[in-house]
């Protein structure tokens, strides 16, 4: 699949947006990652293939520049980008209510992909705040996989709903002169 | 989804300028080594991954990146070690003996599992740091171009690496400007959450505003007019390095088989 130059530039900028917005979330000590805004943005504007590629490259590049462990989570970002594009194609980014539903779907499915990586590659921990929830659930008698799944599902749902809402708000504020260059965006117009 | 980001993540690039042997290697040779380290981190037991991590750290220090290695390893491994100690050492019901140490009921197998995971992450992290600390993104782009990588793909990989530093600076400038206008980044959770759009929106709007112009400049230069680009000052490569890359890649199945046997 050959992408046009504007989509390529959008993907490159979206990767940077993912990384820098993730840094802003750290600056303000937000208990969420919010590191897929660019990926969802590309999914809405340029489709599932461009979204998935943006997701994969974000994690690989993040791994190359500052956090090599992030590279292990590239399948999660792939799924986020692909799902954002597929849901956009189905018209799920036309209204705020549908966007929240799209965020919930992405949150659930990305958790299903993330849990085996967290459990089998990293022993069930990530070094982040969700480890407290995982430890609590283990202490009250849950199994490791269930504890990791529940702890991450709660965080991921909030994270992906917020991510989709931010991406949706950005897209809605973009001038028509800009969005007219992305034919795929027609599926998300109200 | 990613693991906890180290506090020092403000620095856009971990690259440390230098002229060591590792700096002079072709970036593709170093990428092959990173791939080998990543496979070894998962294929080998702790008796293999810990020496591998120590070797990578020693090479990193030799290449002048000791400080970056120390900071990254401490920021990444410390929270993971604490979480693994609590989760596997104390909470997960591992088979095997348990012992009371300083009033804590610890699982021997759980602690062994903790060491295994930490060894794996240390090997993965230090192997990647060798590449990241000694390879400037511009050199990686030139290496990809000079090996006939499709220009569009090379652009998407290398352009974010080059854009990251200016965008991070722009984000810092927006943060300082908003703080000068009274934005509170240290208050309650609600106050900080309200500050998020004030930092995010100007940055994203500025980033997207450039896209049309960048695309026109690229098209104007005909960057995809030919299937491959010619690089005037491509990173040095040699027959020995090309052979080394093949050996590294071809040894990966052997490494996996050896790891299975070792386990």
Image (cartoon, grey):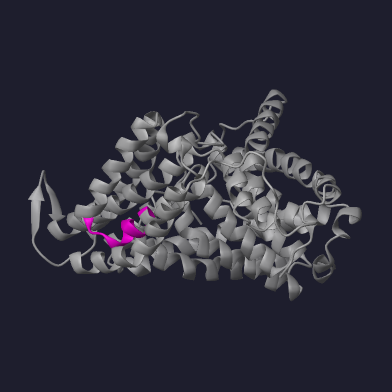
Q: Residue B226 at what x, y percent from top left? A: 76, 57
- Most extreme residue toward the top, as rendered? B180
Secondary structure, magenta segment, majority class: helix
Q: State the residue in front, B42 or B146.
A: B146
Q: Which residues are magenta?
A: B37-46
Residue displayed at 48% across by 41% down: B132
Question: Percent x, y for residue B173?
Answer: 68, 28
Q: Left of A141 or right of it: where is B203?
A: right
Residue ranking furthest to the bottom: A90
A61 or B254: nearer the viewer: B254
Q: Is residue A17 visible?
A: yes
Q: Name the residue located 60 percent from the left edge and 59 percent from the top edge.
A: A55
- In the rendered image, residue B262 lying in the magenta stretch gets the answer no
Quadrant location of the N terminus of chain A in the rendered image:
bottom right
Say left or right for B102 vs B18: left
Q: Is residue A165 visible?
A: no
Q: Is residue B82 left or right of residue A30?
A: left
* Residue at left offset 73%, top offset 56%: A8
Q: In which quarter of the view is residue B197 placed?
A: top right
- Residue A93 percent across, percent down from the top left: 75, 67
- Residue nearest the viewer, comparing B182 with A57: A57
The C terminus of chain A, quarter of image: bottom right
Q: Is residue A190 left or right of residue B97?
A: right
Position in image of residue A26 (x %, y %)? 54, 40
Check the image and name the residue furthest to the front: B239
Q: Residue at x 39, y 33 (%)?
A: B71
């Amino acid at each position: 699949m050959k992408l046009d130059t504007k989509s390529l530039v959008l993907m490159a900028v979206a990767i940077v947006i993912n990384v820098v917005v993730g840094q802003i979330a750290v600056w303000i000590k937000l208990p969420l990652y919010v590191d897929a805004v660019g990926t969802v943005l590309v999914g809405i504007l340029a489709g599932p293939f461009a979204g998935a590629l943006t997701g994969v490259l974000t994690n690989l590049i993040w791994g190359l520049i500052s956090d090599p462990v992030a590279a292990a989570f590239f399948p999660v970002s792939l799924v986020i980008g692909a799902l954002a594009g597929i849901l956009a194609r189905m018209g799920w980014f036309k209204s705020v209510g549908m966007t929240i539903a799209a965020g919930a779907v992405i949150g659930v499915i990305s958790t299903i992909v993330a849990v085996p990586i967290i459990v089998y590659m990293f022993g069930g921990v990530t070094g982040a705040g969700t480890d407290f929830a995982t430890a609590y659930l283990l202490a009250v008698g849950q199994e490791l996989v269930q504890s990791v799944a529940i702890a991450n599902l709660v965080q991921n749902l909030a994270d992906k709903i917020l991510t989709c809402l931010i991406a949706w708000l950005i897209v809605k504020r973009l001038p028509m002169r800009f969005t007219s260059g992305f034919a795929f965006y027609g599926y998300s117009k109200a | 989804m990613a693991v906890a980001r180290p506090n020092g993540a403000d620095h856009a690039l971990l690259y440390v300028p230098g002229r060591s042997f590792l700096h002079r290697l072709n970036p593709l040779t170093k990428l092959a080594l990173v791939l080998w380290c990543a496979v070894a981190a998962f294929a080998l037991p702790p008796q293999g991954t810990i020496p591998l991590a120590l070797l990578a750290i020693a090479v990193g220090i030799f290449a002048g990146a000791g400080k970056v290695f120390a900071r990254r390893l401490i920021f990444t491994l410390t929270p993971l070690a604490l979480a693994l100690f609590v989760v596997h050492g104390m909470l997960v019901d591992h088979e095997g003996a348990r012992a009371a140490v300083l009033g804590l009921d610890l699982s021997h197998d759980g602690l062994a599992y903790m060491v295994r995971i930490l060894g794996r992450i240390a090997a993965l992290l230090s192997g990647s740091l060798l590449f990241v600390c000694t390879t400037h993104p511009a050199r990686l782009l030139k290496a990809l171009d000079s090996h006939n990588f499709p220009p569009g793909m090379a652009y998407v990989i290398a352009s974010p690496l080059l854009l990251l530093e200016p965008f991070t600076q722009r984000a810092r400038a927006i943060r300082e400007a908003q703080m000068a206008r009274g934005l509170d980044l240290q208050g309650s959770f609600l106050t900080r959450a309200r500050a998020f759009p004030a930092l995010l929106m100007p940055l994203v709007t500025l980033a997207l505003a450039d896209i049309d112009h960048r695309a026109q400049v690229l098209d104007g230069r005909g960057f995809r007019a030919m299937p491959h680009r010619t690089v005037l000052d491509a990173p040095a490569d040699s027959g020995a390095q090309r052979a080394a890359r093949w050996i590294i890649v071809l040894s990966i199945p052997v490494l996996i088989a050896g790891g299975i046997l070792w386990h």
